[in-house]
Image (cartoon, rainbow, N blue to C red):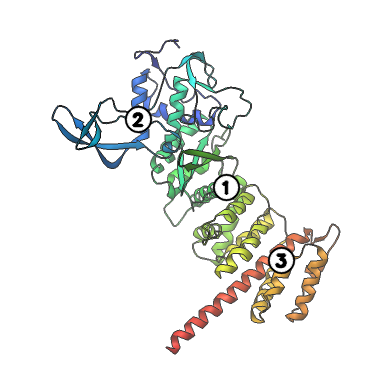
């Protein structure tokens, strides 16, 4: 690579030339798709990037045409999302300022273009090439900014990150190589990182077709990272084995590349799913999270059990699974925190039940909203598969919880449920159940009060048993309350 960059200097982009930095590797694949393997000049690279990252806004501006002595309209352009969050390069006009009818105008429309400045001699920190390099910024690599001004996601760096022109171009191109899922001012940039052939296939089959309609790739949109990852995986899972509905071939391919189904020949390594979550600010942005998720095959196996169970008792099981997770939103506060914590627990194979309990008592009760039909079945399977809670224990909890919740509603004894939720020790838990036995005339199953070594019930920690019992009872209470409200409303309508 020559140390002096001119208009005749040429570069070749090959997708297989990986740097080890996912953002830049994705960008190299994008440039290889558009530029091929032929040598290209800086001007050609710049034109390609401009076509990918700049689009008309639909608005008009005016400049003063000195040839016609008139104001002429031009189409305003801007950076396309998500590049507009990170790239703060304004449009520049080469024209002079003139005053027409008391207002300032330029004598030429502004031009917007990416910056591929040559920089200084050095070594590229990404690819190791000795060439002209420049300091990297958020415009070409969102995970890296000047460490003297902001924190970055590579804290081992003691100085700025330097990039050669090809890596700078790849940094810009990566904005076109990721999926952008937005909710309000929050944006999630979804990258698929693997070997070059995998990334090229995903770019052609998934990213390009869905780039401007990413909502079709997610079951729901949220402000947090883990819920977005789960929303994407649920939609990919749903298209792996469709028989009655027309599947999306792109999502079937993506599922295979993520390692959901055995591939021939076997994949060396499934794709990694990387999500960068950033929030747009008035003067810049905040990067909140970078999340990596690998090997969703285990979760997919559980998903197939959900499908099998719901097929027997419900219609449209795929939509029911999506609605079961989508529901955990505090609509009054427009807050998806509960859904994100539940998604995080499911993705990490941990216990989501405490967050479901909190949602029911803190949000669903206020909104008089029981859980979506099928939710309890879904999390019963999860508790059996991941938390190793026996089916017999779950059936006992579900049956008694239903009777407890209905009785608490019928006898206006919600305090029993609240006391059960607040039980912090096994002694308090047993005391509440004993109290419920007399106040609600219920017989407590002996299984639920049989604590063994390690304060466990049938091998399950007592606190988890108590939490699941709270969920079952509270949901039964809300269903009974919902039915009584409907009957009351119907009665009023009849009287009229």
Query: Pointer 2: residues within 10 angstroms few (<14), some, or many (20+)?
Result: some
Q: Which residue is mark 1?
A: 226
Q: Which residue is mark 3?
A: 421
**Compared with residue 407, is residue 170 higher up or lower down, i.e. above or below?**
above
Q: Which residue extends farthest bottom?
A: 495
Taking the spot 29% from the left edge, 30% from the top edge, the residue there is: 110
Name the one closer to the observer, 337 or 270. 337
What secondary structure is marked by label 2? helix
Q: How far, Cα to Cα, is label 2 from label 1?
A: 32 Å
**Compared with residue 269, is residue 476 higher up or lower down, i.e. above or below?**
below
Counting residues from the N terminus, which is met first, the one under dot 2 or under dot 1? Answer: 2
| Quarter that holds the N terminus | top left
Q: Which mark is residue 50?
A: 2
Q: How far, Cα to Cα, is label 3 from label 2?
A: 57 Å
Counting residues from the N terminus, which is met first, the one under dot 3 or under dot 1? Answer: 1
Marks 3 and 2: CB-CB under 8 Å? no
Name the one closer to the observer, 373 or 421. 421
What secondary structure is marked by label 3? helix
**Compared with residue 54, is residue 368 higher up or lower down, i.e. above or below?**
below
x, y (%) of residue 483? Answer: 55, 77
Query: Pointer 1: residues within 10 angstroms few (<14), some, or many (20+)?
Result: many
């Amino acid at each position: 690579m020559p140390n002096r960059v001119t208009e005749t200097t040429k570069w070749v982009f090959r997708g297989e030339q990986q740097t080890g930095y996912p953002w830049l590797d994705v960008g190299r694949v994008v440039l290889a798709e558009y530029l091929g393997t032929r040598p290209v000049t800086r001007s050609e690279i710049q034109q390609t990037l401009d076509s990918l990252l700049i689009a008309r806004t639909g608005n008009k501006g005016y400049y003063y045409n000195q040839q016609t002595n008139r104001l002429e309209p031009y189409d305003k352009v801007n950076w396309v999302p998500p590049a507009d969050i990170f790239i703060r390069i304004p449009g520049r006009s080469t024209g002079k300022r003139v005053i027409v009818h008391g207002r300032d105008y330029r004598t030429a429309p502004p031009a917007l273009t990416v910056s591929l400045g040559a920089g200084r001699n050095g070594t590229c920190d990404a690819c190791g090439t000795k060439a002209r390099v420049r300091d990297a910024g958020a415009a070409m690599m969102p995970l890296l900014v000047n460490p003297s001004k902001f924190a970055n996601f590579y804290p081992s760096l003691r100085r700025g990150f330097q990039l050669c022109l090809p890596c700078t171009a790849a940094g810009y191109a990566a904005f076109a190589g990721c999926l952008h899922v937005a909710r309000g001012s929050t944006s999630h940039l979804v990258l698929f990182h693997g070997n070059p052939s995998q990334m090229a296939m995903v770019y052609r089959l998934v990213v390009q077709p869905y780039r401007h309609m990413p909502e079709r790739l997610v079951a729901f949109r949220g402000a947090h990272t883990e819920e977005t990852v789960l929303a994407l995986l649920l939609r990919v899972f749903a298209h792996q084995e469709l028989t009655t509905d027309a599947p999306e071939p792109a999502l079937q391919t993506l599922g295979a590349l993520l390692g959901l189904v055995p591939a021939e020949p076997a994949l060396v390594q499934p794709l990694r799913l990387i999500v960068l979550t950033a929030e747009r600010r008035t003067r810049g942005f905040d990067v909140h999270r970078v999340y990596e998720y690998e090997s969703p095959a285990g979760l997919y196996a559980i998903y197939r059990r959900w499908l099998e169970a719901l097929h027997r008792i419900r219609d449209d099981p795929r939509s029911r699974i999506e609605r079961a997770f989508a529901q955990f939103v505090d609509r009054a506060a427009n807050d998806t925190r509960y859904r994100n914590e539940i998604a995080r627990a499911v993705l990490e194979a941990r216990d989501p039940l405490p967050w479901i309990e909190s949602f029911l008592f803190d949000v669903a009760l206020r909104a008089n909203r029981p859980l979506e039909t099928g939710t309890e079945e879904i999390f019963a399977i999860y508790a059996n598969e991941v938390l190793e809670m026996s089916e017999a224990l779950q059936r006992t909890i579900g049956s008694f919880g239903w009777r407890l919740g209905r009785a608490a509603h019928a006898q206006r004894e919600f305090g029993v449920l609240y006391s059960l939720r607040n039980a912090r020790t096994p002694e308090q838990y047993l005391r509440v159940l004993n109290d419920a036995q007399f106040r609600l005339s219920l017989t407590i199953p002996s299984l639920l009060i049989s604590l063994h070594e390690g304060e466990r019930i049938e091998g399950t920690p007592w606190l988890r048993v108590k939490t699941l019992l709270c969920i079952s009872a509270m949901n039964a209470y809300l269903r009974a309350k919902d039915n009584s409200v409907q009957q009351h409303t119907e009665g009023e309508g009849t009287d009229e």
